[in-house]
Amino acid sequence: MTASLIDGKELARTLRGRIADEVTRMGAEHDVVPGLAAVLVGDDPASKVYVGMKHRDCGEVGIASRMIELPADTSQDDLEDVVAGLNGDDDIDGILVQLPLPDHLDARRIQELIEPAKDVDALNPYTAGRLAIGDPTFLSCTPYGVLELLAHAGVDTVGAHVVVIGRSNLVGRPLSNMLTLKGRDATVTLAHSRTRDLAAVCRTADVVVAAVGRQALVTADMVRPGATVIDVGTNRADDGSLVGDVDFDAVAEVAGAITPVPGGVGPMTRTMLLQNTLEAARRRRGLV
Ligand code: GUN
C-alpha cells in the first residue's frame, strides 16, 4: 500500500476526548448537561445497532441520551406528538429521528417539525437551506466528518477539484454545498448514477468522495495518482464483512491518502453528532 491511511477512528477518539472535556466544563461552570433524544420507529436491525451506538457514544462523553423506541405501526400523528414533546422539552438539546422510517410515515414532514435549534442531524429542510447558502447552522454529521478528515489529513480544498459521487440528502448534496462555500472554496462535481463516463470524471479529481452504497464502485483506474479518496460507503460483502464503495486494496496503491472501511468516516459521523449536540446545548443555553 502506497497511500497514507486517514485514520477516522483515531481522529474520532481525539475529538471525543475534547467533547468530553467540554461537557465536564459545562457541568462544572454552568450546571448544564447536554441532552440528545434519539427516536427509533420499528425493528430495522441496522437502525437498532446505529441508535444503540449513538446512545453509547453519548454515555462515553457525558451527554445525557434518551432513547425513544416506538412500534413499527406508530401513526404519523403519534410520531409528530413525540417530536413536538421533545421540541418543548428543556432537557433535550438535540433531536434525531433515525432513518429510514416505516413506509407509511412521512419522513420529510417529521424532519420539518424538528425545532431548528435542536436539529443536530441537519435534516430539516430549513437547516439544509441555511447550510446551502452558507448561513450559520448545524452541519450534517457525515459531511462534517468528511471535512474534519480532510483537514486532519492536511488536504487543502481551496481551488481543489472534488468529485463527490452520490447525490443523497444525507451526504452527497450537503457535502457538495459545504465544499463550495467561501473558506473551503473547492470546485465540486456532484456525480451520480446518470453521470457519463464516471471514471474519466473521477480521474480529474484531487479528491474523490464515494457515497453511493455500492461495493467496488471506485476502482484503481478511476483515481489519479496521489489523489485523496474518502469512502463513505457501508456495504456487506458476500462473506459478511463490512466494506465501502472503494476497491480499497487496489486504490491504496494509486491514491495519496485513503480512508478505510470500517474505521474511516463511520466513527466521525457519530462524533460529529456529539459535537452538534454540544453546540446545540451551548447555543440554546446562551453559553456561546
Ligand atoms: N440513517 C442512516 N444514517 C442516518 C443519519 O445520519 N441520521 C438519521 N437520522 N438517520 C440515519
Image: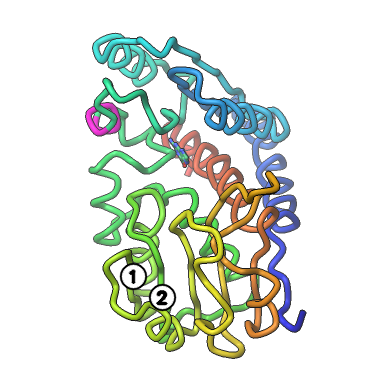
Q: Residues within 10 Å of mark 1 (few under 14, many from 20)?
A: some
Query: Going 42% across and 74% down the picture, which residue do you hit?
Result: 184
Residue 58 coordinates in the image, percent (x, y): 64, 31
Locate the N terminus and report the quarter of the image it occupies. Answer: bottom right
Q: 26 or 130, which is in the foreground?
A: 130
Q: Residues within 10 Å of mark 2 (few under 14, many from 20)?
A: many
The image quadrant of residue 120 is: top left
Q: Amino acid at mark 1?
A: Ala
Please tell me whether mark 2 or mark 1 is closer to you in this view. Answer: 1
Q: Which mark is residue 152?
A: none
Q: 207 or 136, which is in the foreground?
A: 207
- Asked if labels 1 and 2 touch by Cβ distance under 8 angstroms, the answer is yes
The residue where tag 2 is placed is 163
SS type, badge 2: strand
Residue 7 coordinates in the image, percent (x, y): 72, 63
Q: Is residue 224 above or below residue 48?
A: below
Q: Is residue 6 above or below residue 127?
A: below
Query: Going 47% across and 44% down the picture, which residue do you hit?
Result: 288
The residue where tag 1 is placed is 191
Q: In the rendered view, how is the structure colored? A: rainbow
Residue 158 coordinates in the image, percent (x, y): 44, 82
Question: Where are the magenta residues, as a range?
Answer: 108-112
Left or right, 118 with reference to 131: right
Q: CA distance from mark 2 to mark 1?
A: 7 Å
Of the numbered discs 2 and 1, the one sitting upstream in the chain is: 2
Left or right, 82 with reference to 148: left
Query: Going 29% across and 39% down the picture, which residue do you hit?
Result: 124
